[in-house]
Amino acid sequence: MASAACAVASAQEIPLAVITIHDITPKFLVFYKAAESQHAAPDLRWALWKSLYDFAAVPPTADGDIIARRQLDAAWLSYAAALPEIELGAAGLQPSPQVILGRVMSLLKPDQPVHLRVLVYVGSFDGNAFTTASSPRRPTVALPVEQSEAARGPIMAHEFTHAVQISMGMMSGGWLRTVGETVLAEGLAMRTAERLYPVLPPTRFVEIVPGWFDRAEHLRRAILLDVRLSLRSDASGDVMRFTMGHGQLGIDREAYYAGWLVVGAWLGQGRSLADIARVPERDAPAAVESAIDALLAAPMPLGANQTPGR
């Protein structure tokens, strides 16, 4: 496994950012070559994946392996064409993580150094990077190497926003957190990426599957009402339902859409990204609830579902 350490600091006295890069793409290549050489059927391929690689952007829950198996099966035929990028590993990581992190820090204005671990891995072509923290204020951002450079910039900006919030002590970075904190953190990350890439359409920051954003817009009121009911819950099932799972509305990632609206409303009121980044995790449910109430009280945009009777 290759690793390297880099440090950056801006001329505007932004605190030091220390980035350590850890590359696990060689582990994936060992798995891939073993599966190819054995002409592995899906069950054997999955067994080899578990024993030789075993890394995916899935929640640390009982459903994680089910999702990872589904992702592997869906992505398998695409890996051959992506081998040149995969073999480059961290060496092909563009745009520069140091540059993107510096830009995020210039918006969020942390008042202390950021120590960030970037883990480079092979994902499943779904654009799903993630951020976690194994210890307080020490975030890890996992970036899939098979993404295109054009897609990776906004995704880096999104995940580095989470990392800076963790470094500031404003969020824990764990899987179990309230739905309200999830809404705030994801909304802040999407809007920060939007600020850094203003020429891109909203769909580039919000949706993974084409058409999702239009569908969410149509269900606007229903999603806000649904999310509002669970803002204070930190149950794993609720966090899963509002992020990767499907609730009663039949749409995934409701927390992301609610976050896009909530943080967008705050920015429209004159709040800065740096201010929003400083809302403590414990205060997020109440802050998001107030914002959702204001959004529900305002006239709904044309095409939004009014959901009578709720």
Image (spheres, rainbow, N blue to C red):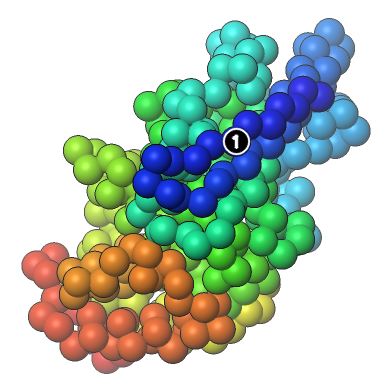
Answer with left or right where residue 174 lies relative to residue 220.
right
Q: Which residue is at a point 75% across and 39% down the rendered structure image?
A: 55
Look at the image and tell me whether residue 118 can be seen: no
Residue 237, given in percent of the width and then of the height, sits at 64, 72
The answer to which image quadrant residue 48 occupies is top right
> Viewer-proximal residue, 158 or 40?
158
Q: Which residue is at a point 69% across and 55% down the rendered structure image?
A: 138
Residue 261 against residue 89 in the figure, above or below: below
Look at the image and tell me whether residue 267 can be seen: yes
Residue 121, given in percent of the width and then of the height, sits at 67, 31
Q: Which residue is mark 1?
A: 7
Residue 43, given in percent of the width and then of the height, sits at 82, 31
Residue 146, given in percent of the width and then of the height, sits at 56, 24
> Viewer-proximal residue, 232 or 250?
232
The answer to which image quadrant residue 233 occupies is bottom right
Residue 214 against residue 302 in the figure, above or below: above
Q: Which residue is at a point 81% across and 24% down the rendered structure image?
A: 1
> Viewer-proximal residue, 80 or 249?
80
Residue 157 against residue 236 in the figure, above or below: above
- Image quadrant in which the C terminus is located: bottom left
Kindly state the secondary structure of the residue where label 1 is placed.
strand
What residue type is disc 1 on?
Answer: Ala
